[in-house]
Amino acid sequence: MEKTDQWSSKIGFILASAGSAIGLGAIWKLPYVTGTSGGGAFILIFVIFSLLIGFPLLLAEFIIGRSTQKEAISAYKEIAPGTKWHWIGYLGVITCFILLSFYSVIGGWIIQYIIYSLTGKVGQENVNYELLFTDTVSSPVLAVGTQAIFLIITIIIVGKGIQTGIEKASKFMMPALFILFIILMVRSLTLDDAMEGVKFFLNPDFSKLNSQSILSALGQSFFLLSVGVSVMVTYSSYLSKKESIVQPALSIVAMNLLICLFAGLAIFPAVFSLGYEPTAGPGLLFIILPSVFEQMVFGNFFLIIFLVLFLFATLTSAFSLLEIVVASASKGRGGRHRLAWIIGILVFIVGVPSALSFGVLSDISIFNKTIFDAADFLVSNLLMPIGALLISIFVSYKMKKSVLNSELIQNTKYQGLFHIWYFLLRYVIPLVIIVVFLDITDII
């Protein structure tokens, strides 16, 4: 099947792939985990695991996609015809579909808060941000309406294709993301007592490194790189066979680490300077940060910058989640625009219960979790680790070693990399993933 769509440049591929990897977790979760788990000591462990776990898995997905030039399901079928290994592709598609269904809910909240900041509803004195957030997420009209807006933006971009859609948007959004972060970092670091936040975030405290924080660093090392769901298989299938995959993979890891660093340096100095307690997740973005920026000169302006930054990070991840489903459905036969809308609408329908799980459906629980939290648990704690485990086994045991070697070292100076990568992927990473899986599912 002839490949009809490719990245126009390596930088386009890197920016789009980095955009896929850089999501909300890198901005509102990892910095807080870092601050409470040893600061610089945790960062050191996380960097090591990212290079030894996340990076090899990223290369594995790149090899599958670039070697076959096919989307996730077809790629596994071509490499292992007549077997059941292509179900890894189906697992990735299903995982991304579910993930986008509730991820789009958060994207909708961000859009709503951008509207609030533009209309002056936030950034004013004496606003009860906790109550405002509760009212926002519990309102059926706001929750479902903004979720629909977020998905429409995603559908339009993905429907335009690789070069004119995802790549073009990523080339704008990713540099803008870095520029906005730098602006916020400078502002945050110039506040009084900003160094208290820097100390919380980066001060190395090896006494806080325990088995739980090390396991957390292990889990984050592959969760934050979009590996395990075959998104990178699909993205790398649009990469020319003439291009090296090692340098783009290193760039993506470096950009992800840099954004995590930027996030911590933009958030915590401001939080500590203005007397707030650090937190993670939705509470940080929708309750703590509006309270913080309210006390700054031009605070509403900086809040808008932060919300736009979060929106860009969420959208670039959403593009990849929808793309893997659309690509698997079209299999290069065309009809991308129509399929993007059909699949996007289905994602919206499946996501409505998650959007309503903080309001009219709040009484419904699945294993003592809201519908939203149950979907999150299913994806993050079950499907992604299983997918990462299967990919590591598939590449190291089912693909020919000679093919792997030629794909990995092609057009690269990293000739000695193969044996280290192969050893990690075949023996170390499966064991690590199993340990992380047992930990996050509370089996150990």
Image (tube, rainbow, N blue to C red):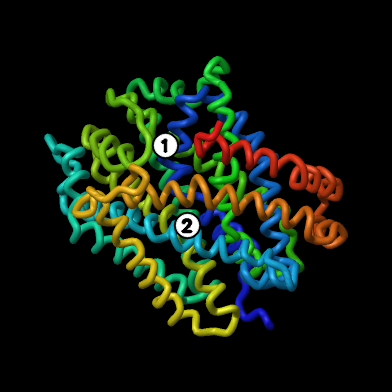
Q: Find residue 403 and report its image quarter.
A: bottom right
Q: Find residue 295 and report its image quarter.
A: top left
Q: Residue at x 60, y 77 (%)?
A: 5
Give the x, y percent position of residue 125: 13, 36
| Residue type marked 1 | Met
Name the residue tied to disc 2.
317
Up-down relation of residue 332 to residue 392 (above or below): below
Give the x, y percent position of residue 79: 75, 68
| Residue type marked 2 | Ser
The earlier-in-sequence mark between 2 and 1 is: 1
Name the residue tied to disc 1.
185
Note whether residue 16 is visible: yes
Residue 252's tag is none
Q: Secondary structure at mark 2?
A: helix
Q: Secondary structure at mark 1?
A: helix
Q: Gap between marks 2 and 1, in whole Å?
A: 23 Å
**Which is nearer the eye, 271 or 279?**
279
Question: Within 10 Å of the Cα at label 2, are there few (<14), some (14-19), or many (20+) other Cα atoms?
Answer: many
Q: Residue at x 50, y 63 (%)?
A: 94
